[in-house]
Image (cartoon, grey):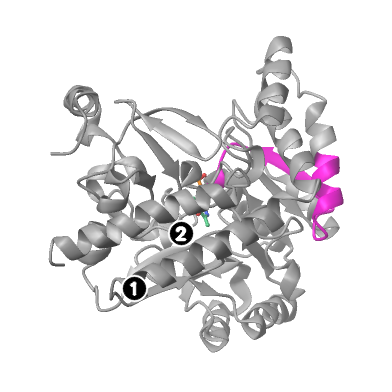
Amino acid sequence: TTLGQRELALRERAGQVIPGGMYGHMRVTDFSGAHPQFMVSGNGCRVTDADGREYLDLMCGWGPVVLGHRHPGVTKAILDQLEHGDCLDGTSPVAVDYAELLVDTVPSADWAMFCKNGTDATTTCVTIARAATGKRKVLVAAGAYHGAVPWCSLRGQGVTAEDQTHLIRYEYNDLLSAERAAAEAGDDLAAIIVCPMRHDVRRDQELADPAFAHGLRALADRTGAVLILDDVRCGHRLHLGGSWEPLGVRPDLSAWSKALANGQPLGAVTGIDALRDAVSSVYVTGSFWYAAVPLAAGLATLRELRNGQALPDMLRTGTRLREGLAAQAAAHGYEIRQTGPVQMPVLYFAGDDDLSLGTAWAEAAVRRGVYLHPWHNWFLSAAHTDADIDAILDRTDQAFADLRDTGS
Ligand code: PMP
């Protein structure tokens, strides 16, 4: 095995006290025999595992870390707020500062509210939409991930058919299928929820066809449904105003989380004026939704992003990575597909239907010191420099060579 001694010891102990040794997307045994499950620190675009091995990071905490691990400005905001307290008996004023800045940044946002994670945000959006319309049905793209709770879970275990009775599936980028789903909902249609791009696991990413995005907007307008953009994964990595701003399509509600606070637990819902009353009518809350430290981190992160360098930097370094990987694959005689925005790449090998080749390559990459995933999209951060990308490419080149050496 190539796993370190501490990693193995932690897995052994975890196996005794944490079911399955870990759960959810961080149970690494679900996708790799080589990735460490336990990490002890991060700095910029580097993370260190329990055995002290350092990796160039292409997962960025699976999205949240948009400015780099322990970004100095965000860390200062966290420590400053901690000095004053975190969970207080009333909301910190920083919530108002941050809501103002979000509303100023996101053209479709007339108001903002905060929660803890992406599932809170998508679930709150659906609740608001049902309260606003008095209708029940929600159109959801087949295979789209909006969280791991029963109303939207993609797995059957522990979920009843009744939990999803009011969902009607459509195909991403297929407007006709959405129109059919809306017809099926009849006069009971509350909402259409959609991600800015198709980023389902285990398949190529697909950018939204502009005609599809505009078509969903028109469908919502025609039927009175609320258009919900699930910007949890893409938000604040592609475009600060919302990921469909470049398409000119504005949602009624947006769900945000991952990148908002550079790793602090925070989600947000933003929306249009017409939905203010519905928001006030529903009861949504959580013990930690008002915690001041993540809000302070969110404010500091958005201020930094608004300075303007982070997103263009990620576009540049992401392009450098994509072009480098394409050249390497070709040089080593592999046909690969890289899809999605360069800031959120994913890589598959041609003909690799069972993903065994991609998994072997990802395992080789992690052994060479680059942390990436075989079938979930990766994430760039503003901490990645051109030199870091070149260091990553040195190692991925070795990973392609390793793959060749094993005869794959
Ligand atoms: N929506 C999308 C598009 C996501 O990518 C995720 C998380 N991967 C969620 C919702 C759920 O967010 P969370 O895990 O923070 O609850």
Q: How packed is label 2: few (under 14 Cα within 10 Å), some, or many (20 or more)?
A: many
- Quarter of the image with the C terminus in it: bottom left
| Callout 2: SS | loop
Q: In the rendered image of this protein, does residue 381 appear above or below residue 130?
A: above
Between 43 and 226, the one lying in front of the other is: 43
Is any atom of residue 218 visible in this view?
A: yes
| Callout 1: SS | helix
Between the residue at mark 1 and the residue at mark 2, the CA separation in whole angstroms equals 35 Å
Image point (44%, 59%), residue name: 377
**Residue annotated with mark 1:** 331
Between 384 and 67, the one lying in front of the other is: 384
- Residue 115 is one of the magenta-drawn residues: yes
Label 1 or label 2, whichever comes before in sequence order: 2
Q: Residue furthest top?
A: 83
**Residue annotated with mark 2:** 145
Say which amino acid is labelled 2. Tyr
Say which amino acid is labelled 1. Ala
The magenta segment: 99-118
Image point (59%, 32%), residue name: 264
Image point (34%, 73%), residue name: 331
- Quarter of the image with the N terminus in it: top left
